[in-house]
Image: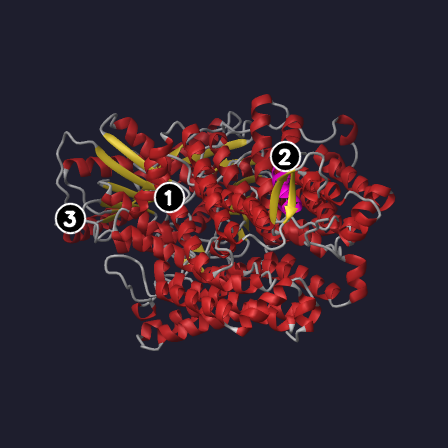
Amino acid sequence: MSSLVAQLIVATLVAGTPLVYAALGELVVERAGVVNMGVEGMMVVGAVAAFAVAMATGSLGLGVLVAMAAGMLLSLLFAVLAVSFNANQVAVGLALTIFGTSLGSYLGKSYVGMALVVPPSGLGAAAADIPILGQLHPLVWLSWVLFTATWFFLYRTKYGLALRAVGESPASAHAIGYPVIRIRYLATLFGGALAGIAGAYVSLVYTALWTEGLIAGRGWIAVALVVFATWRPGRCLAGAYLFGGATMAQLFAQSAGVGLPSELMSALPYLATIVVLALISRDETMMRLNVPASLGKPFSI
Amino acid sequence: MPLHFEARTKPSAKMVWLAPATALALTAAAAMIVFASAGLDPVQALATFVLSPLSDWYGVGELLIKATPMILIGVGLSIGFRAGVWNIGAEGQLTIGAIFAGYLALRFGPGDGIWVLPSMIVAAVAGGMLWAAIPALLRTMFNASEILVSLMLNYVAQLWLSWLVFGAWRDPAGFNFPQSEPLAPAALLPVIIEGTRANISVVFALVAVALGWILVGRSFVGFQLRVTGLSSGVARYAGFSPHRAVWIGMFAGGAAAGLAGVGEIAGPLGQIFPTVSSGYGYAAIIVAFLGRLHPVGVLLSGLLMALIYLGGDSAQMSLGLPSAISGLLQSLLLFFLLAADVLVQYRIRYAPRGRSALGAAA
Amino acid sequence: MTGSTRRHFLKTTAAAALATGAGYRPAWAAEEVLKVGVIHMGAISDTGWEHYQAQAWRALETAYPGKVKVTVLENIAQIQDCERLFRQLSTQGNKLIFGTTFSQYASLKKLAPTLTGSHFECCAGIEAGRNLGVFEARQYEGTYLTGIAAGRMTKSNILGWVGAFPVPQVIYSLNAFLLGARSVNPAATLKVVWANAWVDPAKEKDAVAALVAQGADVLSGSPNTPVQGLAAEEKGVWSIGSTGDFSAYVRKKQLTSFELDWSSAHLGAAKAVIEGNWKPESRWLGLGAGGFLKMTTSSPDLPASVAAEMKAAEAAIVSGTLKPFAGPLKDQSGAPKVAAGAALPDQEIRTMTWLVEGVQGTLPRT
């Protein structure tokens, strides 16, 4: 039974990783006061780009880098429209999702049905001896490194303070000399890069295959997750594994002969997010502690 | 950066309508680049894309029936959007409309009652409003963002429908496939153009446009909503309740989306499937923006978006291009419009070494 | 399955076809190029269902070089669009038009009688109608054979199945899989997990992890992608290609496989249209010449004795002496469903909504 628990844990870590990347990226964007709902689109393009490059060069690392670049390119488009031109963030994000999904399926046409030969996962012989964690792919480990770095950046550096200040009140941040627009650009680009990695993880590591519908709404779950986590990185990490683990637990239960209403299980993350949102929003102190005050509001000098 | 943006004192009236035209031209240009890069004659391909879906009356009917849900929802949403109420849950509200109407259709449709169809329509509108009431309530009671709540509820609605169609509503004669029985004739909307699928819901959309136009341009409520959208502080000072704006905005979108939902199952679908919309609720947001949140604009942009959908299928059929081209062009159209919109609010000036907010980043 | 049931089945449907099909015969000149239209609901890219549908019209192009022109539409996911596009294909002069999934059946059933300029065929439809033929594969014949391999190779006596949706095709396939396994290994059991998606590769991978964690060591399922096989390989357990051969992806651990082969449906319909004697028929075919299933590659690690056992069973199925759903059969709860000496009739197989004894798992809401 302990090996069953161990396998459930590993499976949850593996399933939660794309959510960790995507949600962590979106969290930083939203902490800077910008809502980019185009995560799904950026993930799709990241997945295609990574797969194409890995097929052409045989290098997973290069694939991940190109996916980051592709995600950043899309997020740059978002930033120009939403941050510089002050266009409605919801509209731009939505269009970005449609754009990314369509572009992905357009560009992915020629990579359809191709198999990527997956190199053995894990950190090599040294890590293989570590129980449970040794079997995980380096990108899973990298997500923890990135999480720690992001947490440290947000709460322990002056740059993180500046970013949070911009999300709270861009006007006062501007008044004390922070480059509001530049910070929002950088945050948006960071979100794009992480969404790109999230996509790359799915197409390179998770399935080693490109097909339409590969991302299957995981980008939207990431958007929900940031709210669920009340814009805190630690809760975001836990939430990613909770959301990933909910699916796994349901599948494990099924294979043990216990049928759970799958639609209800699938709806839980969204319902939980609504409840969390209602709970924190009703209380002004909670709001001040949790929600970036200028979330979604454009800023111009 | 020698070019610099200078805020206009008031939005340029000319640019308000010039911007969509520019966006349309740019989108057409982008389409031609895509066609050319696929080795096609760009002009001919564009003509195929735009004209071939409309080569006969049937095609025109298809355009209308495709545009109808987007126009309906677009009109409903823009009423809220004008007041700064961001309902992005139309997809879910449409689904709930289909569920409410679908229940009546499956339960009473075979009885052939004359009242079945009207009650389905009422139920669908009520269902859409009910689903929209959840974010409205959470917003007015708890201050929860209606953007996020309505988005989450899209998934919940979709899963609810899927639960029904995979379970209780599955057609016993349908080999266990996830779909309901075909709706009885009494539960289907009557066709208004002989030989096409264009049904009475096209008329509903036109009525919605007219109602929206009256509400937005000719009524005191419309004025209140607009003021609320511009500044909630001013609105409160003038005695207009921001909560009321939230309720009106959400209800308008929910009612329209619910109506679109019954239009789908009692129209082109004629049956209930696990997915009844696949994206009209989101597309309508683009339609609302393209139409400048104005009912007449929404009418035009809805037709345009529908044409791009049909054109994408034609492109696949006659030009061998992936149908993903529809989504690409629709999203590009919105990108171009939002970019062009900057000219509504700002004037571009040549100013060497000028400092500006936008110039710093762009 | 060339037994009396099938022959009777074909005879009655052919008779029905004759009765209803007369009068719908577009004029045809031999020198003309036959225009064929196909609407795929999903992307051909999915390497599974639509991929094998596409193989069929590709076979048509190969068989009639220059004589057949196929127009293909894919990703027509909105059922609202089907009617328009089928009609458009017909008005553009396509004489033979195929739908690839059951979801298109309702549209076609409504449309086919009115568009008499074309003939229609729908894969996985319920029954032939006016101007509409249907065809579907007896997938359970394939899974019965692969079940034999699974039953012989399992060490834990636990087999695993990843189901897309609990539709009868999937249910009878997994039931026959276990019955095949039990025919050689009565101790075998089958664990079932539902992905509740036709295409969600990542979730299929999760499902495999869940099954392997519970001790399953030979996996199969109703996949649209090779992901299950790849995931099983990663876990070091066997996988079986069901309705598709994924040995090009799953290099080491694909035990055996069978494939869907719809080419005879497309070739037969095209030939009939060209010769002017097309009739709406309902075909439900399995293994054997001209059938819709064929056994494909097996791993070199599959013992020759097991391969021989599968061959023998295949011959017996084709000749009709072996019926996978022959009694005595009990359902999951142990209640008798088929008496000894009897076999489940076709109609009951096609509408199967119960799981055989030894399957561990539930049918979501049936």
Q: Identify the main secondary structure in magenta.
A: helix
State the image coordinates of residue B306 (x, y, percent, origin top left).
40, 51
Q: Which residues lie in the magenta part?
A: A68-85
| Residue carrying label 2 | A205
- Seen from the viewer's position, the closer of residues A237 and B239 is B239
Separation (CA) of disc 2 from disc 3: 53 Å
The x, y position of residue C235, in whole percent, is 63, 36
- Mark 2 falls on what kind of element? helix
**Image: B120 above or below B57:** below
Tell me: C317 left or right of C213: left
Residue that label 1 marks: B311
One can see residue C233 in this view: yes
Q: Is residue B135 visible?
A: no
Q: Residue at x 22, y 45 (%)?
A: C119
Displayed quadrant of residue C144: top left
Q: Secondary structure at mark 1?
A: helix
Residue beneath disc 3: C24
Outermost residue to the top? A57
Instruction: Specify whether A71 is left or right of C126.
Output: right
Amino acid of disc 1: Gly
Mark 2 belongs to which amino acid?
A: Val
Local secondary structure at mark 3: loop
Above-or-below relation of A261 to A210: below
Do residues under tags 1 and 3 come within 8 Å of each other at their CB atoms? no
